[in-house]
């Protein structure tokens, strides 16, 4: 693919990281941002790094995963790799596998490790879970307010083909969500 398209909020770590990756790799990047005409350090950096920002009102943004929206994007951007909001995809799980290997290599210990990680779209937390050793634990802190965190996380695990379990979900630290 010759360009990347992705989605996120104006304060998304994914948007920031993807913007910097675009800067390093010089790959064209289109970002669809939830909200209109926003300005903050995350978006300023992404723009300075060469990302093209497209602002969508909240109603349009909610359509981003519909077949109609995605088909139109593919039609107008046939050479683009379209990454979902937050980047959560099999690619993210693979990337987290590589990161976990680096952590284990660096620590060079058989002792159990306790990981604490935020849960936005799930890629980081679930990628870590999938790559963890049996002696490790992961505590997942959802950043968003959901009616049933366990159901949401299990659904995402099923979609991504993650079979491991044992995560502890700490659901009362989202400060109202976003």
Image: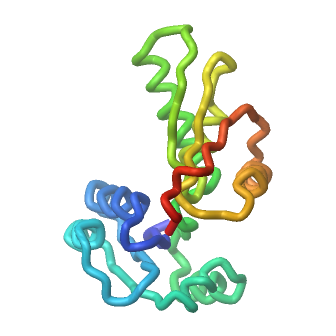
Q: How many dots with numbers?
A: 0
Looking at the image, residue 145 sits to the left or right of residue 159; the answer is left
Looking at the image, residue 169 sits to the left or right of residue 38; the answer is right
Instruction: Give the vertical position of 65 relative to 135 (above or below).
Output: below
Residue under the image location 38 percent in, 89 percent down: 36
Instruction: Give the vertical position of 85 relative to 95 (above or below).
Output: below
The coloring applied to the image is: rainbow
Q: Position of residue 39 (x, y in %)?
A: 26, 79
Foreground residue, 32 or 71? Answer: 32
Instruction: Give the vertical position of 142 relative to 132 (above or below).
Output: below
Residue under the image location 46 percent in, 80 percent down: 34
Q: Residue lying farthest left?
A: 48
Foreground residue, 166 or 157? Answer: 166
Q: Where is residue 15 in the image (x, y as percent from the top left)?
A: 39, 65
Q: Where is residue 40 in the image (x, y as percent from the top left)?
A: 25, 73
Q: Where is residue 153 in the image (x, y as percent from the top left)?
A: 71, 52
Residue under the image location 55 percent in, 8 percent down: 110
**Dividing the picture into quarters, in which one does residue 170 lie?**
top right
**Dividing the picture into quarters, in which one does residue 167 lie?**
top right
């Amino acid at each position: 693919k010759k360009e990347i398209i992705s989605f996120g909020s104006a304060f998304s770590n994914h948007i920031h990281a993807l913007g910097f990756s675009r800067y390093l790799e010089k790959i064209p990047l289109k970002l669809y941002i939830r909200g209109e005409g926003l300005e903050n350090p995350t978006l300023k950096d992404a723009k300075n790094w060469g990302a093209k920002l497209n602002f969508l009102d909240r109603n349009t943004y909610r359509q981003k995963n519909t077949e109609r929206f995605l088909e139109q994007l593919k039609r107008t951007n046939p050479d683009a790799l379209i990454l979902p909001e937050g980047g959560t995809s099999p690619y993210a799980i693979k990337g987290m596998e590589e990161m976990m290997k680096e952590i284990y290599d660096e620590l060079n210990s058989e002792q159990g490790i306790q990981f604490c990680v935020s849960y936005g779209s799930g890629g980081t937390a679930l990628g870590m879970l999938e790559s963890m050793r049996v002696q490790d634990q992961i505590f997942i802190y959802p950043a968003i307010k959901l009616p049933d965190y366990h159901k949401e996380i299990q659904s995402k695990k099923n979609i991504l083909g993650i079979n491991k379990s044992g995560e502890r979900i700490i659901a009362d630290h989202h400060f109202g969500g976003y």
